[in-house]
Each structure stands twice: as structure tokens, then as C-alpha cells.
Amino acid sequence: MTESRRSPLKSAVPSNIVSPVRRCSRTACGRPAVATLTYVYADSTAVLGPLATYAEPHCYDLCSEHSERLTAPRGWEVVRLATDTGPVRPSGDDLEALANAVREAARPQQRQPSGPGRRDIDPLEVARRGHLRVLRSPES
């Protein structure tokens, strides 16, 4: 008894519907997204800013036409964050930070005595939770 069973990869239907370019979330609009809309319900505010790095489930990507025509419900405020449509050029601060990072990486590491349970603690660090740190204000 031979069972003809296709592997999941061979039975998949090829599709050109999925695109690496994020599209506008508005129905029947296929234009590329240029801005991300987020609602802050507690403040009755709609925030429209530059396209987010990742597609979030509770945010809406909008094309330039829909982002320009955006209106909010009565009683709500629309906050439009500056979007730079020109090519991004590194600033002097960016280049200096990159040079400092390269210098730091090239510096030889000094070995510190290590003991059980010893870890380097930032003097401003108050507490830790997973990869998050709570820092004390530098003024206090």
C-alpha cells in the first residue's frame, strides 16, 4: 500500500501577492506605505509618524495620499511627527559616534577579577528585569 503524499513545500501554491514592500493599510489601496498611524486611546490622540521599522499589529501603515488626508474622530487630536522624505545623510554626530565605537572596540580588554555571582554593575543602575535596566537619575 503506497500512499502518495506531497511534502508541504511541493504542495504550496506559488504567489506573487506577498511583497517585501509594505503597502498602505487602507482597503483597496496598493500604494507603498510611507507613514505609520498609531492611536493612543487614553489621550484621544492619533499619532502619524514616519514608517515604523517593523509592522506592528495595532498600527496602520499609510501611503502619502492617505496620510495627508488623515482626519481623526470628533474630540480627538492628530499629532503629525516630522517625516523626512529626502535621503538620510549621516550627521557629524553620527560619524563621531561611529569613530568612538571603533576606537572602543579596538582597545584591549582588561581582565577584572571574577567571582561567583559577580557581574559588572553600572553605578546608575537601580534594578534589573531581564534585559531591561532601571537607572537612577544622574542628578540624584
Image (spheres, rainbow, N blue to C red):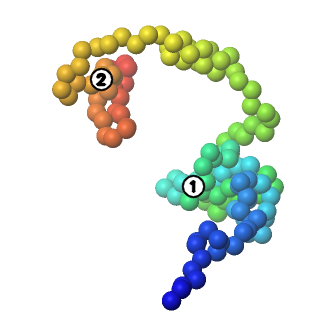
Q: Is residue 59 above or below residue 139?
A: below
Return the disc, 2 or 1, that comes first in the chain's sequence. 1
Identify the residue position indicated by label 2 in the image. Answer: 121
Residue 31 in picture, x, y percent from top left: 80, 58
Where is 17 relative to 118, above or below? below
Q: Residue at x 58, y 72 (%)?
A: 7
Q: Is residue 137 visible to the viewer in this orientation of the structure?
A: yes
Q: Give how far apart the Cα atoms at labels 2 and 1 are.
A: 33 Å
**As rendered, which of 104 and 32 lies closer to the eye?**
104
Identify whether 67 is placed above or below 87.
below
Left or right placement of residue 113 versus residue 11 in this view = left
Q: What residue type is disc 1 on?
A: Glu
Residue 109's spot in the image, x, y percent? 40, 13
Residue 71 drawn above or below residue 137? below
Extreme residue in the bottom direction: 1
Residue 56's disc is: 1
In the picture, residue 122 is in which quadrant? top left
At a point 68% along the width and 55% down the height, the residue shown is 61
